[in-house]
Image (cartoon, rainbow, N blue to C red):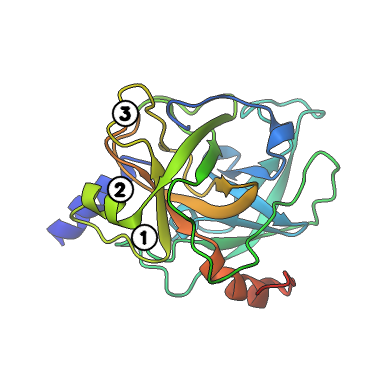
């Protein structure tokens, strides 16, 4: 039991896009703030009028009652009726083979209490090739309201950061005590002294975009604000059939 507690504490340390910069919601209209009793704790992505996608880690063992998403605003704390809106989450579905110890298959679907039809939001483009991997060196865009440094409050304005996808082997080398599975990919700037961009607490569950497509869900990592460790994403492509089955949506998969 002691080993499990140590492992989980390692992951919790790395939950804003540290090293990123302010951005507009008009560039990332699919970005959602996942909330409990109105308080932000994770990111999520709009994939349909009634569905969102986040990490299983974010909702695991939480009661759906009290969960909601906020959309249409880059401002995390705005109370203006003209700046974004909030919708209740009536239930969520965690991928059945999610492993909370290794974070493998770390994804969950959010079902909204009403359809989201507002013009200020846009559903994200999803992968259509379920066997295609994210290639090394592909540019990855991460967005979120997480902390800028460990222990700080969440960013009040949506942050974005560009990072480079790195090979699974290189990622595994930086995490010798973990397993980087085929359901994951990693992005960051290893050994860079000037580009310290990675995810921190509050970014988990948010989108990782590659060529304007949702290829990843921000899942875990360590070393918030340092280039020593990359951010690890859950690949979306391997789970597209499951997403179709659960939502009834059709994506024209190949």
Mark 2, residue position: 11
For marks 3 and 2, give the one nearer the viewer. Answer: 3
Asked whether the residues under the numbered discs 3 and 2 touch, taking CB atoms below 8 Å apart as contact, a structural biologist would say no
Mark 1, residue position: 103
How many neighbours does mark 2 have within 10 angstroms: few (below 14), some (14-19), or many (20 or more)?
A: some
Q: Is residue 11 above or below residue 152?
A: below
Mark 3, residue position: 192
How many neighbours does mark 3 have within 10 angstroms: few (below 14), some (14-19), or many (20 or more)?
A: few
Give the percent coordinates (x, y) of residue 202.
Answer: 47, 38
For marks 3 and 1, give the one nearer the viewer. Answer: 3
Sequence-wise, which precedes: disc 2 or disc 1? 2
Determine whether the residue tagged by mark 3 lies in a helix, strand or loop: loop
Give the percent coordinates (x, y) of residue 205.
Answer: 51, 49
The picture quadrant where one finds residue 243 is bottom right
- Locate residue 84 relative to residue 202 in the image: left or right: right
Asked whether the residues under the numbered discs 3 and 1 touch, taking CB atoms below 8 Å apart as contact, a structural biologist would say no
Q: Is residue 91 above or below residue 186?
A: below
Determine whether the residue tagged by mark 2 lies in a helix, strand or loop: helix
The picture quadrant where one finds residue 152 is top left
Of residue 153 and residue 164, the one placed in the foreground of this image is 164
Disc 3 to disc 1, how far (Cα)?
26 Å
Determine whether the residue tagged by mark 1 lies in a helix, strand or loop: loop
Q: Could you tell me which quadrant the C terminus lies in? A: bottom right
Q: Residue at x 23, y 47 (%)?
A: 174
């Amino acid at each position: 039991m002691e080993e499990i507690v140590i492992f989980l504490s390692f992951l919790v340390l790395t939950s804003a896009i540290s090293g990123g910069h302010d951005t507009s919601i008009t560039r990332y209209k699919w970005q959602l703030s996942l909330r409990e009793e109105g308080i932000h704790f994770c990111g999520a992505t709009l994939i349909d009028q009634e569905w969102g996608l986040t990490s299983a880690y974010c909702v695991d063992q939480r009661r759906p009652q009290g969960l909601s998403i906020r959309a249409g605003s880059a401002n995390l704390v705005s109370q203006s009726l003209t700046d974004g809106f909030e919708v209740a989450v009536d239930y969520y579905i965690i991928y059945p083979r999610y492993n909370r110890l290794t974070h493998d298959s770390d994804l969950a679907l959010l079902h909204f209490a009403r359809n989201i039809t507002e013009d200020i939001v846009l559903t994200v483009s999803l992968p259509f090739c379920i066997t295609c991997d994210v290639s090394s060196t592909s540019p990855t865009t991460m967005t979120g309201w997480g902390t800028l440094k460990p222990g700080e409050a969440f960013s009040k304005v949506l942050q974005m950061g560009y990072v480079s996808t790195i090979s699974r082997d290189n990622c595994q080398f930086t995490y010798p005590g973990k397993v980087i599975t085929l359901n994951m990919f990693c992005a960051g700037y290893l050994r860079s002294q000037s580009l310290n961009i990675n995810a921190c607490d509050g970014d988990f569950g948010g989108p990782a975009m590659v060529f304007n497509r949702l290829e990843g869900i921000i899942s875990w990592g360590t070393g918030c604000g340092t280039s020593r460790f990359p951010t690890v994403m859950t690949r979306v492509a391997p789970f597209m059939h499951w997403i179709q089955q659960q939502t009834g949506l059709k994506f024209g998969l190949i």
